[in-house]
Amino acid sequence: MKRLLIFLLLLFSSNIFSIESLDGFLVSAYDDRFRVVSPEKFKPLMEIVIENNSLVRLIGKLIINQKKVVGYASIEPSKFAKLSTSLKKGDILHFIPLSPAFQEVELIIGNKVYEIPPKK
């Protein structure tokens, strides 16, 4: 029993279960970058999960086509928020961090996993 418990702890603490594909977006904020896991296919109703892995509260907004605000999120460290929106083909979705200020994060369908480094 003890060996099983140790094995499960090691398994869940490793990156074996890293998420590489979703039906929506997973946006992970770190102190120096953002990591995005994007869906492989377009869906008219898209869910966006924003997870804060930084040391400070993250405040941001989700927008479509640089004008329509979908919603705002205020996320404490080690927490997450879910937003959802209706999309049409050709819509461009961005998450804009307001505090701490950071470059916009474009959410691109079909790009699998990508990172947005800070602007220099």
Image (cartoon, helix red, strand yellow):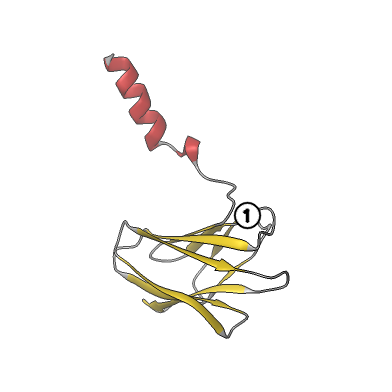
Q: Position of residue 6 (x, y in %)?
A: 31, 23
Q: Position of residue 53 (x, y in %)?
A: 36, 58
Can residue 120 be seen at all in this image of the molecule?
no
Q: Quadrant of residue 77?
A: bottom left
Q: In the visual, does 90 lie left or right of 15?
A: right
Classify mark 1: helix, strand or loop: loop
Q: What residue lies at 40% left-to-right and 62% top-to-bottom?
A: 30
What crowding class fits label 1: few (fewer than 14 Cα within 10 Å), some (14-19), or many (20 or more)? many
Q: What residue lies at 54% left-to-right and 77% top-to-bottom?
A: 63
* Residue ranking furthest to the left: 2
Residue toward you, 8 or 120: 8
Can residue 62 be seen at all in this image of the molecule?
yes
* Residue ranking furthest to the bottom: 67
Residue toward you, 31 or 47: 47
Q: What residue lies at 38% left-to-right and 65% top-to-bottom?
A: 31
Residue toward you, 16 or 40: 40
Q: Quadrant of the N terminus?
A: top left
In the picture shown, does residue 42 fall above or below 21? below
Q: Which residue is mark 1?
A: 39
Q: Amino acid at mark 1?
A: Pro
Q: In the visual, does 47 lie left or right of 111?
A: left
Q: Position of residue 88 (x, y in %)?
A: 69, 70
Residue toward you, 104 or 62: 62
Q: Position of residue 13 (x, y in %)?
A: 37, 36
